[in-house]
Image: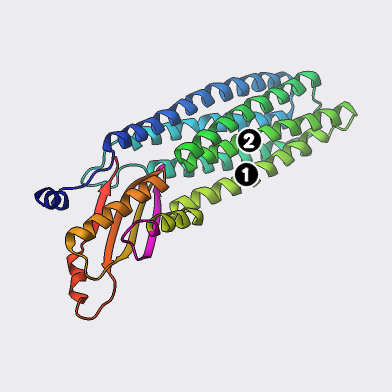
Amino acid sequence: MQGRIRHVLRPHSHEAAGKVDAAMEASAQGMRVLWISLAVLAFTAGVQAVVVAFSGSVALLGDTLHNAADALTAVPLAVAFVAARRSPNRRYTYGYGRAEDLAGVVIVLLMAASAVAAGWAAVSRLASPHPVSNLLAVAAAAVAGFAGNELVATYRIRVGRTIGSAALVADGLHARADGFTSLAVLLGVGGMALGWAWADPVIGLLITVAILAVLRQAGREVYRRLMDAVDPALLDTAEHALREVPGVLDVGEVRLRWIGHQLRAECEILIRADATVVDGHRVAVAAEHGLLHALPRLSAALVHADPEPAAGLADQHALLAPHRTTRQ
């Protein structure tokens, strides 16, 4: 009995060491992706910039600007991952995970800037046409741009989904769009080979439209994260896990939110009206464990146990205080 009483009064932890290791591994994975992406895209953009210098291709210039912007997005993401490692304090009680969401905003702004630059260059070339030379070199640079971006995109999206980073997934989608815009440069090369001088700036405009399309998608993802949106399927999973816990009669309100690449949960469960405080705590702990196993990215759960309505037992509601546990 004394052990049970101490368990009620003492904060409960579920595999704390494993949770710390998981969080650190997620940040380490994110940093590794960023530096590899930066190296690949910087090399790709450098090769394309050399070809732009002696060919004068506006379409390739737009692709190069986009690749350079995509490489630079590694900087705000790296800052965010480093900041997210800081421990919570009395001012930032939930930690610094939101830094990733701010990095997502910076990424969207960089995408917008690259779209403006590419569009301006294409319109200027349409107004003042200039011949493009070294078409074979331009075509080779376009293929290199596609290969580099697709490699980076696949890597970023896979790791971003694994660690639950919306910013990293958005960055991967951005890189994938860059790959397809690189292929569009090949169309411009084909047109110019047929003598269509307007093909190069027109492809540059199409690249601008493609950038704007991905900008819309990435902006929507970042907006949803800033507004605490979650996939409704996660709520279904959480509610199902709670209903499977012995002692849970029903499930009330369930709330989830992302903080960085970790989830936090707040939920209400209904238990027997004649349950004691110790029994209520036991069910709440079991409910929290069920959530931790059902939602791999869950780092903390606040479980409030309410007694089922019954005559003469309404006062028990005040005895069952919220039970909160946290995974670092």
| Front residue (pair 316, 139) | 316
First to last magenta residue range? 243-262
Q: Residue at x 33, y 62 (%)?
A: 248
Rendering coords of residue 222 (x, y %): 50, 48
Rendering coords of residue 191 (x, y %): 86, 31
Q: Answer yes or no: do the residues labelled 2 and 1 have beta carbons within 8 Å?
A: yes
Q: Residues within 10 Å of mark 2 (few under 14, many from 20)?
A: many
Q: Residue at x 63, y 29 (%)?
A: 149
* Magenta stretch: includes residue 221: no
Rendering coords of residue 2 (x, y %): 9, 50
Left or right placement of residue 42 versus residue 201 in this view: left
- SS type, badge 1: helix
Left or right placement of residue 76 versus residue 305 in this view: right
Image height check: is 23 above or below 2?
A: above
- SS type, badge 2: helix
Checking the image for residue 94, the label placed there is none
| Foreground label between 2 and 1 | 2
Q: What residue does disc 2 label?
A: 176
Task: Check the image and name the residue furthest to the bottom.
Answer: 311
Rendering coords of residue 12 (x, y %): 22, 47
| Front residue (pair 136, 195) | 136
| Front residue (pair 194, 228) | 228
Q: What residue does disc 1 label?
A: 214
* Magenta stretch: includes residue 249: yes
Residue 267 image-quadrant placement: bottom left
Q: CA distance from mark 2 to mark 1?
A: 9 Å
Residue type, label 2: Arg
Left or right placement of residue 253 versus residue 111 in this view: left
Q: Quadrant of the C terminus?
A: top left
Point out the tag, 2 or 1, that comes first from the N-terminus: 2
